[in-house]
Amino acid sequence: MLRKTPKTLLIGCQHLTPSTLGLLERFEATGIDPKSMVLIGKCYSTVEGVVAAMHSRGMMAHGGSVPVSAGGYQEAHLRDVANLWQEVFIRLQSGDYDRLVVLDDGGDVIASMPAHVAVPVVAVEQTTNGLLKLKQKSKLSCPVVSVAGSAAKREHEAPFIAGAIADALALRDAVQNVGIVGAGAIGYACAQKLVARFNAVVRVYPEPCADVWKHSVVLGCTGADISPRNGEARSVRYLASGSSGDFEFNTLIKGRPHSFSDMQIGWQVVMNGGYPVNFIRTHEMEAPQEISLTRSLIFEGANYAQTLFGARPAIYELPSDVQYNVVNGWKRYSL
C-alpha cells in the first residue's frame, strides 16, 4: 500500500469519470490527502459533475481544455500538461512534499517530465500508445510501471471497451459491413463483439489500404491518422474512432468547427467529432463492474511503483502475482 504520509503528491492525467473518482478515494483511504491530488482530464471524456465533486473533496482538477477547432486536441492537451507541471513545481517549492506519484493515460505527462525534479518520482502508464511513446524516448526520468503491458489488462479490458464501442455504433445503426483498421487487442475485440451481437460483416486490417474504404463503416483503432485521401472513401458512410484523442481522422477534420457530436462532412459522418465513440461525457458507457478492473490495476500499479523509489529509470512490468490477485478479486465482484 502507498505509505500513509501527507507528503505524497499524486498527480497525473486520467479520464475524469465516476470510476476515476472512486479510484482517487481509494488513494485517500491509504493516507494521501485529497488536497495533495492534482489531476487533468481529457476534454472528450470528462463526465459532467465529476470535476465539481473532486473540487468538493479538496482535489485540484481540470477537465481538459477544449480545442479552438477540430483536430486540435493534442495541442490543447499538451498545454494542459505544461500547466500541470507548473503547478507541481509550485507545490514542490513549498517543501511540503517528499515524493511524487504520477498516474498517466497516454504518456504525455511522463514524457514531459523535466530531467530534474526536487523529490523522488515514480509513475504508472496505463495505455499502449502511452507505453510506446515512452519506449521511444532515449531516456526516462523515473521508474514507470506498465499497467498497459499487463496480461490482465490486455486479456480482460479489451472486450468491455469493445462492447461500449459496439453499442455506440449500434446507436447510429452502423453495425453492418464494418472495416476495422488496427489489428491489436481492441480491433479484434470489436470485430468479435460486432459479429456476436449483430451478425455483422466485419474485416480487420492491420493498416489502411484500398479495401478498407469499400466498407460502409470504418472504425479506426490505430492511434494514428488514417484519414482517407480525396475520393478514396466514396463508399463509406460512417467514420468512427476506437482510440484516444482525435488522431484517427485528424487530417479529415482539421480546422473544422470543433464538436463533441457527430460531424457531417459531405455525405459522410465522423462520429463524436473524431473522438473515441465510447466516451459521451454524460456517463461511462462501460458498466461499473467492468471498468473496476482497470481502476484496480492502476491502483495496484501505483502501490507497486512505491517500491521503486530510487530505482533505475526504466519501464517495469506489473508483477504477475499482483495481476492474478486483481483479476481474481475482480471476477468475484463482477459475477
Image: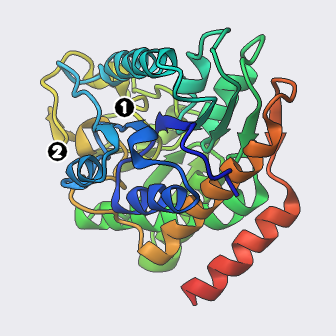
Q: Does residue 319 lie above or below 255 as drawn? A: below
Q: How are the residues colored?
A: rainbow
In percent of the image, x 52 and y 63: which residue is there?
A: 29
In percent of the image, x 23 and y 22: which residue is there?
A: 67
Relative side of 81 to 132, left or right: left
Q: Which residue is mark 1?
A: 246
Tell me the amino acid under the disc marked 2. Ser
- Pinpoint residue 168: horizontal percent, then vertical percent: 31, 61
* Front residue of this view, candidates 70 and 190: 70
* Quadrant in which the N terminus appears: bottom right
Q: Does residue 272 lie above or below 226 as drawn? A: below
Q: Residues within 10 Å of mark 2 (few under 14, many from 20)?
A: some
Name the element at disc 1: loop
- Pinpoint residue 268: horizontal percent, then vertical percent: 21, 39
Quadrant of the rendered image containing residue 139? top right
Tell me the amino acid under the disc marked 1. Asp
Name the element at disc 2: loop
Q: Which residue is mark 2?
A: 261
Relative side of 195 to 79, left or right: right
In percent of the image, x 42 and y 28: which residue is there?
A: 247
* Front residue of this view, candidates 241 and 293: 293
Quadrant of the rendered image containing residue 294? bottom right
Q: CA distance from mark 1 to mark 2?
A: 13 Å
Q: Residues within 10 Å of mark 1 (few under 14, many from 20)?
A: many
Q: Earlier in the sequence, mark 1 or mark 2?
A: 1
Relative side of 86 to 168, left or right: right
* Quadrant in which the C terminus appears: bottom right
Q: How many marks?
A: 2
In percent of the image, x 63 and y 53: which residue is there?
A: 4
- Pinpoint residue 203: horizontal percent, then vertical percent: 56, 55
